[in-house]
């Protein structure tokens, strides 16, 4: 099993907080803008370095699902099976809009310093926290938010008619924002969200998504979730229709759940059964024997 950090991030693979060898200072906004294709090219160089000719199955959700699709398009001969989960072949206007709100929150923080905050010993923590709060709302569904929090108050018997976190959902979002700041870099957030915005698998084919998959021999299993409004089922169906148009080997499952986009990260039995069944079936076709 191979799981690498993405290009442009802040947890291993090169990103804007790393040192520019030409200046011996953090790259900041001098780091080149990256794409999902760039991320996959780096991953391809990794498996080349490891001496791996082909991958049995490439699996990912959300931005990871975009990478799955890019792998299958760019290196079809090296991908036996692909599982794009809760994703799309291109970012929607709505998702680009949410990403822009997050980026503007970061860039409006005085401590962002035009992206040069590391060199100045500062950090746009408030802006990054707000960006994470806004994004986190999109990962959940209205049903999930109601089930988890409703209008329950946070550590108080009555509302205060002020601007503290009266409601549990407010406290939850503030916690998500502050905990995210402790492990992530603001400029990396800008670069990664921009890479998602630029993703459009059909762009090099005159807008015809099916052409991106023509001739593919990869086996596909696309999975979506009924309450996911960030990457709704219609996005997965567009991928399926394109694959069907070129007679690809493809299956599709829409999982019934009220957990929203985050469902692929949670304990969702039907999802796990679907994923396991597809992998086992592909393993049988490939002649693998699991220990």
Image (tube, rainbow, N blue to C red):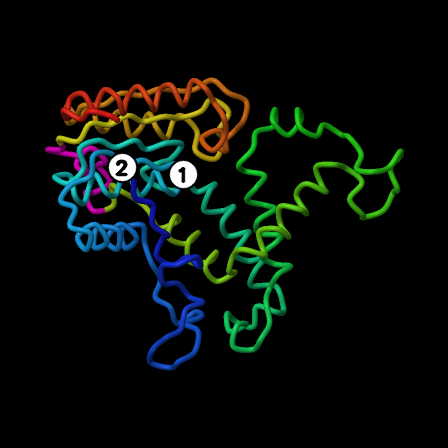
Residue 202 location (% of width, % of height) = 24, 41
Badge 1 vs badge 2, beta-carbon distance below 8 Å: no
Residue 183 location (% of width, % of height) = 54, 55
> Eyeballing the image, is 61 above or below 195?
above
Q: Nearer the viewer, residue 96 or 32?
A: 32
Q: Is residue 122 left or right of residue 64?
A: right
> Eyeballing the image, is 77 above or below 149?
below
Residue 209 lies in the magenta stretch = yes
Q: Is residue 281 left or right of residue 227?
A: left
Q: Is residue 165 left or right of residue 130?
A: right
- Quarter of the figure with residue 245: top left
Q: Is residue 263 left or right of residue 286?
A: right
Are there few (<14), some (14-19), or many (20+) residues within 10 Å of tag 1? some
User: Residue 62: which disc?
Assistant: 1
Give the structural element (helix, strand or loop) at label 1: loop
Q: Nearer the viewer, residue 12 or 39?
A: 12
> Eyeballing the image, is 237 above or below 214?
above
Give the residue at x 26% y 21%. 280
Give the structural element (helix, strand or loop) at label 2: strand
- What is the span of residues highlighted in magenta in the rendered image? 204-216
Residue 247 lies in the magenta stretch = no
Image quarter in which the N terminus is found: top left
Residue 76 location (% of width, % of height) = 15, 39
Instruction: Residue lying at the far bottom in this picture: please name it.
Output: 23
User: Residue 58: which disc?
Assistant: 2
Give the residue at x 70% y 30%. 149
Image quarter in which the C terminus is found: top left
Q: In front: mark 1 or mark 2?
A: 2
- Quarter of the figure with residue 59: top left
Are there few (<14), some (14-19), or many (20+) residues within 10 Å of tag 2? many
């Amino acid at each position: 099993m191979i799981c690498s950090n993405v290009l442009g991030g802040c947890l291993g693979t090169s990103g804007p907080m790393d040192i520019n060898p030409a200046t011996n200072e953090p790259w900041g906004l001098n780091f080149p803008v990256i794409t999902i294709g760039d991320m996959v090219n780096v991953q391809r160089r990794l498996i080349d370095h490891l001496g791996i000719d082909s991958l049995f199955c490439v699996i990912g959700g959300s931005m990871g699902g975009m990478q799955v699709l890019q792998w299958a398009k760019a290196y079809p001969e090296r991908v036996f099976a692909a599982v794009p989960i809760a994703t799309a072949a291109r970012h929607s206007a709505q998702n680009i809009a949410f990403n822009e709100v997050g980026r503007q929150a970061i860039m409006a923080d005085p401590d962002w310093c035009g992206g040069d905050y590391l060199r100045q010993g500062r950090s746009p923590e408030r802006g990054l926290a707000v960006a994470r709060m806004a994004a986190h709302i999109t990962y959940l569904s209205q049903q999930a938010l109601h089930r988890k929090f409703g209008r329950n108050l946070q550590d108080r018997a009555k509302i205060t008619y002020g601007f503290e976190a009266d409601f549990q959902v407010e406290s939850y979002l503030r916690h998500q924002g502050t905990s995210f700041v402790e492990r992530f870099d603001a400029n990396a957030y800008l670069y990664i969200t921009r890479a998602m915005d630029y993703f459009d698998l059909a762009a090099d084919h005159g807008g015809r998504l099916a052409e991106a998959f023509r001739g593919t021999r990869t086996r596909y299993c696309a999975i979506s979730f009924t309450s996911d409004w960030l990457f709704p089922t219609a996005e997965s169906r567009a991928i399926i229709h394109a694959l069907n148009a070129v007679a690809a080997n493809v299956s599709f499952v829409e999982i019934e759940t009220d957990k929203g986009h985050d469902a692929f990260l949670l304990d969702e039995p039907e999802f796990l059964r679907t994923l396991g069944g597809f992998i086992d079936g592909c393993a049988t076709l490939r002649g693998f024997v699991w220990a």
